[in-house]
């Protein structure tokens, strides 16, 4: 990347042994054979790291959601989207770094390990990586760089630019045909929905739960975000909540997702409570799956 501050931040906070660059796949959309990430290894999660969730004991439903909103809305650092200083590009290079190759990031929809420097920052190659708003900024009504949701790295992920474009602002649900840009990865698409590969279904679900908890209409340029059963004509809401709840169970939290949560807290100042406590998703959102 472009900045000295990025190098200092990476070394100081997340020192990782640099390994040799992985051999690129013949087809750039095929999932690369990096070790360990394609198969989920379930991590036993601490329920309350460093007493972060103090005050949630005994709370349920909307009361729990309200308390979590207050916790994860405190002391948040809003990053610039693009800047000569430390920005979202730099943050994602840390949060989604390949644990087996510190020069690379893992692309969410393919699992491909790709050079950090081969990004869409000044590069129009369709296979460069760019920044995916997993909760689409156009659907969510926060398509404004001043909006907190626009630069919230809990739901921003590195993705292949062409696959990001193919997904567009489609909402999440099961079904469809293999995507033209990533058929080998297992992503599926219909005219209204996008189904990601199995290995990140839970990750995506927990990002959606975070967004619906973090944003209650109290932040500049970011409306109240809700999760619903429908996948069309939702206004700023997002579907399908029933499918997301199922994905949360089928794809448990793994080491990569857990470490990502830790890194984001160091960079942005808050955590995703559904990575720390996946069971809270049912406690809060099951009533919305009717």
Image (tube, helix red, strand yellow):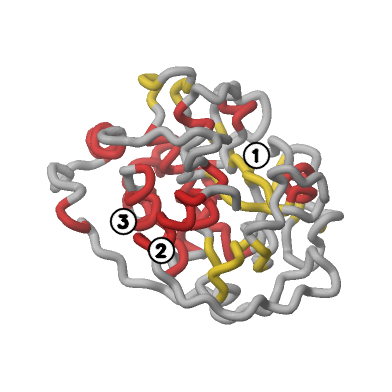
Q: Nearer the viewer, mark 3 or mark 2?
A: 2
Who's the residue at 26% across and 34% down the image? 74
Read off the residue under disc 1: 171
- Measured as percent of width and height from the top left, residue 97 is found at 53, 63
- Count of numbered labels shown in the rendering: 3
User: In whole angstroms, how far apart are the C-alphas of marks 3 and 1?
Assistant: 24 Å
For marks 3 and 2 on the same chain, the one whose residue lies earlier in the sequence: 2
Residue 20 visible to an observer of this rendering: yes
User: In whole angstroms, how far apart are the C-alphas of marks 3 and 2?
Assistant: 29 Å
Who's the residue at 65% across and 35% down the image? 231
- In the drawing, does residue 234 fall left or right of residue 29? left
Who's the residue at 44% across and 43% down the image? 209
User: In whole angstroms, how far apart are the C-alphas of marks 2 and 1?
Assistant: 37 Å
Read off the residue under disc 2: 11
Vertical relation: 39 (above or below) 231:
below
The front one of 240 and 201 is 201
Labelled pair 3, 1 in contact (Cβ < 8 Å)? no
Q: Quick one: label 2, few (<14), some, or many (20+) residues within 10 Å?
A: few
Q: Disc number at residue 206?
A: none
* Element carrying mark 3: loop
For marks 3 and 1 on the same chain, the one whose residue lies earlier in the sequence: 1
Read off the residue under disc 3: 277
* Element carrying mark 1: strand
- Measured as percent of width and height from the top left, residue 66 is found at 26, 32
- Measured as percent of width and height from the top left, residue 271 is found at 33, 48
For marks 2 and 1 on the same chain, the one whose residue lies earlier in the sequence: 2
Vertical relation: 63 (above or below) 246:
above
Who's the residue at 47% across and 28% down the image? 225
């Amino acid at each position: 990347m472009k900045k000295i501050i990025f190098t200092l931040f990476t070394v100081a906070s997340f020192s990782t042994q640099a390994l040799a660059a992985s051999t690129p796949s013949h087809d750039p959309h095929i999932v690369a054979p990096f070790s360990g990430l394609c198969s989920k290894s379930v991590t036993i999660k601490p329920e309350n790291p460093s007493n972060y969730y103090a005050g949630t004991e005994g709370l349920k439903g909307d009361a729990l959601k309200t308390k979590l909103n207050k916790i994860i809305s405190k002391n948040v650092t809003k990053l610039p989207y693009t800047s000569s200083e430390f920005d979202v590009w730099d943050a994602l290079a840390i949060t989604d770094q390949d644990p087996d190759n510190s020069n690379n990031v893992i692309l969410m929809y393919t699992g491909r390990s790709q050079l950090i420097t081969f990004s869409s920052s000044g590069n129009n190659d369709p296979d460069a990586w760019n920044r995916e708003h997993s909760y689409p900024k156009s659907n969510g009504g926060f398509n404004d760089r001043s909006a907190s949701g626009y630069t919230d790295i809990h739901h921003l992920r590195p993705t292949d630019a062409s696959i990001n474009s193919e997904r567009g602002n489609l909402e999440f649900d099961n079904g469809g045909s293999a995507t033209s840009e990533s058929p080998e990865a297992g992503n599926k698409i219909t005219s209204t929905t996008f189904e990601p590969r199995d290995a990140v279904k839970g990750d995506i679900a927990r990002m959606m739960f975070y967004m619906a908890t973090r944003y209650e209409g109290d932040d500049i340029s970011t409306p109240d975000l809700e999760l619903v059963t429908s996948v069309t004509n939702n206004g700023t809401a997002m579907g399908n909540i029933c499918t997301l709840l199922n994905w949360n169970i089928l794809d448990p939290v793994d080491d990569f997702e857990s470490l990502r949560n830790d890194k984001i807290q160091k960079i942005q100042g808050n955590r995703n409570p559904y990575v720390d406590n996946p069971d809270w998703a049912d406690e809060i959102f099951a009533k919305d799956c009717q």
